[in-house]
């Protein structure tokens, strides 16, 4: 779940800390040696790059990327600073507020709008159009890093989720196996029918965990957004300013009711499961991410793909939909060397950089061309995750108040499902919380 963890930050604090940090450094006036093209060519440019510290493989991959870049561009040096995840957002905001931000920074997709709205990021649209190979990136992926018609971040990898099911349970109950074709998902009604047949609470066996429970708001909300979209609903307006008219739409209400019914009416889902219920045979179906393939193989070697379990596309309602977006690279609005910073960002997130990084980490590249270089990504089971992202991916709500929005949406699901509270009242409360957060942010900006 680490790839889904959202940075829990105060947007009001971001607005206060980052206000006034968007101006570009003025170029020196007058003639000098620095104005001479030959002198510029020889000048050594030093760039700073901050990112969240990952696991050993991810850190080694970044080390190799930086070394490869500096070998390609010997006149540019990059000082990379990995920062523990728990401290990363705070240190980054403080550096921006103090006027000493890094030239380049990594951000998780949902937080891009907060930083862009505060003027902390340099727009990259012109750079992308010049030499960023825009056509090599799915439009839905680019939309994830676009705020008010400007692209602010360059994506490196993608994340995706799918339906994992216990093959032996299906066969024992005579349930036809779902298609492995990414374009042929089961409907949620088909999933419910299978879950009913598998469900046996007396033996501690449940049919389905539809969205990884109700833990971390940002993480588990990531699993719930697609259910809303699949039923034709939505969470917020396209401009990210309000939830009114979207979170309370008939389609969204239908999705929330279906989700709640899995627990309360059908009782095929449980509020609490024993440890690792899926590989331990206590859960017939779970919605999980591409990263779980490696986790299951490592931790449960006797629970084998193709024998004990298989993977199918994410279920659909009236449409197919999956949430996209992962960590990406951007440039500080105050960088004194934005052109050189773009060279680094473009190298790391371009075809060659993505290929190098994903060869080591086994992540999914965000570019079409890089994905084609890995035969396994066009084969089952990874093709399911790749095709879903490329064809049916959607950005999570692009709003500068993303943390508050995620909290409100997750609370709404909890109130309706766990508390069995009136759905209209719960949704109305969520809309009020989201809209108030946006209004408070705007008021803070005006101070």
Image (spheres, rainbow, N blue to C red):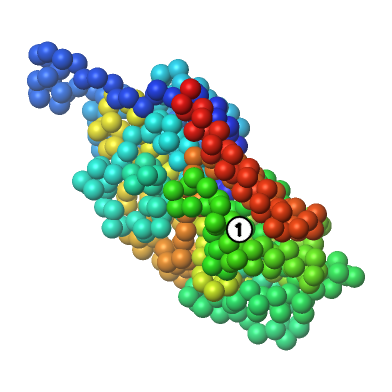
Residue 254 left/right relative to 358: right
Give me the residue at 23% from left, 28% from top. 75
Which residue is labeled 1 in the image?
A: 248
| Residue 310 place in picture, x, y as percent | 62, 72
Give me the residue at 56% from left, 79% from top. 179
Which image quadrant is residue 99 in?
top left
Number of numbered tags placed on the structure image: 1
| Residue 254 place in picture, x, y as percent | 64, 67
Q: Is residue 271 above or below residue 99?
A: below
Near-viewer residue (64 or 131): 131
Residue 8 left/right relative to 382: right
**Label 1 neighbourhood size at 10 Å, few (<14), some (14-19), many (20+)?**
many
- Mark yes or no: residue 103 visible: no
Give me the residue at 54% from left, 36% from top. 439
Q: Is residue 75 above or below residue 417?
A: above
- Residue farthest right in this picture: 202
**What SS does tag 1 mark?**
loop
Q: Is residue 54 above or below residue 170?
A: above
Give me the residue at 77% from left, 77% from top. 196
Which image quadrant is residue 102 in?
top left
Near-viewer residue (429 or 226): 429
Near-viewer residue (256 or 286): 256
| Residue 118 place in picture, x, y as percent | 43, 31
| Residue 427 place in picture, x, y as percent | 66, 54
């Amino acid at each position: 779940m680490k790839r889904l963890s959202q940075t829990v930050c105060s947007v009001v604090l971001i607005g206060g800390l980052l206000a006034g940090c968007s101006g570009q450094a003025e170029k020196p006036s007058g003639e000098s040696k620095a104005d001479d093209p030959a002198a510029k060519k020889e000048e050594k440019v030093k760039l700073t790059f901050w990112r969240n510290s990952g696991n050993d493989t991810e850190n080694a991959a970044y080390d190799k990327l930086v070394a490869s870049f500096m070998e390609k561009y010997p006149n540019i040096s990059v000082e990379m600073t990995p920062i523990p995840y728990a401290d990363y957002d705070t240190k980054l905001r403080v550096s921006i507020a103090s006027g000493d931000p890094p030239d380049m920074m990594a951000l998780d997709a949902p937080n891009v709008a907060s930083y862009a709205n505060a003027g902390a990021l340099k727009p990259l649209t012109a750079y992308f159009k010049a030499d960023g190979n825009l056509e090599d990136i799915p439009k839905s992926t680019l939309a994830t890093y676009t705020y008010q018609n400007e692209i602010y971040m360059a994506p490196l990898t993608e994340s995706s989720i799918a339906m994992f099911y216990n093959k032996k349970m299906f066969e024992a109950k005579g349930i036809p196996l779902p298609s492995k074709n990414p374009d042929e998902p089961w409907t949620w009604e088909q999933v419910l029918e299978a879950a009913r047949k598998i469900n046996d609470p007396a033996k501690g066996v449940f049919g389905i965990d539809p969205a990884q429970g109700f833990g971390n708001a940002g993480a588990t909300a990531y699993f719930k957004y697609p259910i809303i979209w699949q039923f034709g609903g939505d969470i917020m307006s396209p401009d990210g300013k309000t939830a009114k008219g979207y979170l309370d739409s008939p389609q969204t209400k239908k999705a929330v009711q279906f989700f709640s019914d899995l627990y309360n009416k059908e009782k095929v889902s449980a509020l609490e499961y024993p440890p690792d219920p899926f590989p331990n045979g206590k859960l017939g179906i779970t919605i999980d991410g591409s990263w779980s393939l490696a986790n299951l193989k490592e931790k449960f070697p006797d629970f084998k793909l193709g024998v004990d379990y298989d993977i199918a596309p994410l279920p659909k309602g009236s449409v197919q939909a999956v949430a996209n977006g992962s960590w990406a690279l951007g440039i500080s609005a105050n960088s004194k060397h934005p052109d050189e910073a773009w060279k680094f960002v473009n190298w790391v997130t371009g075809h060659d950089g993505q290929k190098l990084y994903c060869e080591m980490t086994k992540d999914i590249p965000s570019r079409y061309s890089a994905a084609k270089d890995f035969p396994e990504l066009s084969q089952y089971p990874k093709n399911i995750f790749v095709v879903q992202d490329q064809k049916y991916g959607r950005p999570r709500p692009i709003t500068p108040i993303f943390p508050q929005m995620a909290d409100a949406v997750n609370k709404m699901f909890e109130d309706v499902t766990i508390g069995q509270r009136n759905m209209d009242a719960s949704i109305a409360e969520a809309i009020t919380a989201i809209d108030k957060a946006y209004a408070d942010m705007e008021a803070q900006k005006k101070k």
